[in-house]
Image (spheres, grey):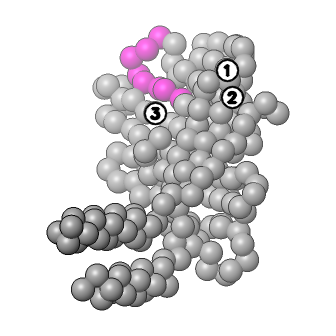
Amino acid sequence: MIQKMMCGLALMGCALSANAEVQGFDWAYSGFLPSYATEMNPYPQYGDFDPDRVLKGRFYAEDLDHNGTFSGNEVTSFTIDGSSFMNCTGARRCGLSNVSFTPGSALAFDTYSVTEYGQYGSGWSRTTHSYRAGGSFYSVYENDWSSQGGAVYTYHFTPETKFAISAVPEPQTWLMMGAGIALLGAAKRRRSRKA
């Protein structure tokens, strides 16, 4: 019985891994130089380098041309802090371009999102986020009721900015691990019955 179950699980694992070509990655950049500006005072005011500031996300991609690099139309999902930058709906618009990742190097991307509510002059507001790996990422907050106008918070990449990336475990990895634990439990139960 256990041998048949092990053979079945092995075949299922092979079938799943044969179909699994999309790969997922968790990534993070940490350590940035902050700056702040407003419409009334457009010259950026710089703060101290912040080693604890983190920009993180996840992406899924399939190396369709088998060249070892994930780019452009090979990316199927891209999120930053849990927000998608490929599938935006409603008041939020977004876009993603210049994506490139070769394992062993840093992730490159250029993305934005804009969320706008109301009409100008009657409670209008707009929030813009822009991220360019290797350059900077910023948030712009605008509305029609503040005397300061828009405010821009920017975080600049520096030579001290660090990059980290790790593969997201594939579903069949979790399935095989669960199956292995179940087999160990079944084998232990079988032994205890014989004893």
In the rendered image, residue 137, in percent from the top left (x then y), is placed at: 63, 36
Spatial separation of the CA atoms under disc 2 and disc 1: 5 Å
Report if the CB atoms under discs 2 and 1 are less than 8 Å apart: yes
Q: Quadrant of the N terminus?
A: bottom left
Residue at (50, 67) in percent of width and height: 76
Spatial separation of the CA atoms under disc 2 and disc 3: 24 Å
Magenta segment: does it hold 151? no
Between disc 2 and disc 3, whose residue precedes? 2
Location of residue 132 by image quarter: top right
Badge number at residue 127: 3
Between disc 2 and disc 1, whose residue precedes? 2
Badge number at residue 103: none
Q: Secondary structure at mark 1?
A: strand
Give the residue furthest to the right: 159
Residue at (67, 20) in percent of width and height: 50
Q: Secondary structure at mark 2?
A: strand
Name the amino acid type tagged 1. Answer: Asp
Q: How many marks?
A: 3
Give the residue furthest to the left: 193
Crowding at label 3, few (<14), some or many (≥20) Cα neighbours within 10 Å? some
Q: Secondary structure at mark 3?
A: strand
Name the amino acid type tagged 2. Answer: Gly
Q: Nearer the viewer, mark 1 or mark 3?
A: 1
Q: Write the start and end of the magenta stretch as one range.
A: 140-147
In the rendered image, residue 24, in percent from the top left (x then y), is placed at: 52, 61
Badge number at residue 31: 2
Crowding at label 2, few (<14), some or many (≥20) Cα neighbours within 10 Å? many
Name the amino acid type tagged 3. Answer: Thr
Along the horizontal axis of the image, is 46 left or right of 148?
right
Report if the CB atoms under discs 2 and 3 are less than 8 Å apart: no
Spatial separation of the CA atoms under disc 1 and disc 3: 23 Å
Q: Tell me if residue 19 can be seen.
A: no
